[in-house]
Amino acid sequence: MSKQSEQYADIMGRDSSFGTYVFKPQPFTRLRLGSVGYFDRTAEWQEITNLFEPGLAEKDGFKPFIGNLSLREVTESKWQATSGETETGRSSRISTEASGAMAAAPVEASLQVKAKKSKTGSASLITSSTVRNHRFDRNFKGPMMDWVESNAQDILASCHDIKSQGLWIVMSAWVTDEAAVKMSSGENQDVDVSMDLGATGIGKLGTSVGVFDKLQREGWWTYDKDEKTQGYVVSFAGVQFSARRLSKFFRSVPLEVANETISLPVPRPPAEQDESNKPAGSDSPVEEDPIDESAYNEDEDRMEAFGLSDDENDAGVNFKKEKAERQDEIVSKLKQLWTNGTAEQIRVELSAIFQDSPNDLKSLLDGRPELMNVLYELRMRWKENS
């Protein structure tokens, strides 16, 4: 994000139930649900792929997204202050809650206002009276996070700017037909919303025609109604990632959640694989006990994404824990088969894993490619004795 975008989001409040506010509202056709990308230095959204569009991740050069995303019914939202917020003025519908020149505005002329102040400055957002919330339904966070983990290296390689601008996954969006944004820097610099709106003449002659055009003359950034955009995203919920220092061969985590800790498995350097450096399926010797269970242990997931409910966050954590438990079970079975499995036991267990847990196995092998040799040797023992 640009410095202005960061400042605006900080002033408006990142920990609110409305996620992250966008300094430069983006067309909903651009900042879409399921979008994976980043905000460039001009505050424009740049999408690298979209997980809600089937097959697009593969077309864009990434591993496929394995998940079933569905949409929740669209709801209307009102800007409301949370218990931890301090506001200049208040979040309101101008027609019923404002004062002075704004009090006379009829219902059809109503707008919504969000005004906030902090030590770094003041910011305000004016929208149409209707703000629509679009979001995914049920368990979406876990599968989307899982996809980022398995594609972390390719994501960083796809665009140089991600290393400096970070990465977002869009999981919910608040959309309105028209919007106006204004921000001032400095503790004593307030945005006088009442004065600016009064100057537009809202409430006079029972109309609000041209309000956003007139706000532009008062120094506001305005976004007029345009059917092609499907509205403007003024805030969104999702998960943000920052880029860590990279090296040519990753051993540490290439991406980490901003202000959080999450383990993203990546391939080990070739020098740390078997000495012959042969690919899986070669006749290279395998160590006596190649399965180190401790290597797979992950830190507890402490993910908290902006703008998602507790239930949605909990579902993401549970998804990750359940996946880790299933993969631990796969590793345990492989270890048992390696130690004392008969050809028939190997056949039965491997067939069950391939049939019942293909996605978990694929993700496990992405993070621990050395297990490919284990599978190869077990299959060889199965075939030789069948």
Image (cartoon, helix red, strand yellow):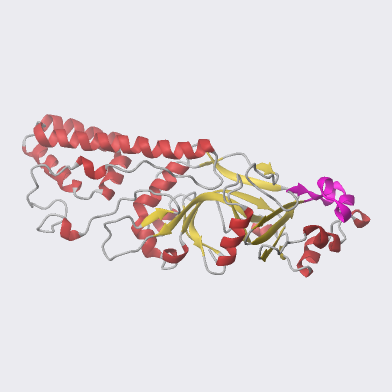
Residue 8 position, x and y percent, is: 62, 60
Residue in view at x 46 percent, y 49 percent? 54
Q: Nearer the viewer, residue 130 or 91?
A: 91
Residue 179 position, x and y percent, is: 71, 58
Residue 18 position, x and y percent, is: 61, 47
Q: Quadrant of the C terminus?
A: top left
Residue lying furthest right: 205
Is residue 260 in view?
yes
Residue in view at x 27 percent, y 49 percent? 367
Residue in view at x 33 percent, y 64 percent? 246
Q: Nearer the viewer, residue 62 or 99?
A: 99
Question: Does the magenta segment cover residue 102?
Answer: yes
In this picture, is 279 found above or below 324? below
Q: Is residue 350 left or right of residue 38?
A: left
Q: Quadrant of residue 7?
A: bottom right
State the extent of the magenta-drawn residues as a range. Answer: 91-111
Q: Quadrant of residue 27?
A: bottom right
Residue 120 position, x and y percent, is: 62, 62
Q: Is residue 179 left or right of residue 27?
A: right
In this picture, is 315 found above or below 278? above
Question: Does the magenta segment cover residue 103?
Answer: yes
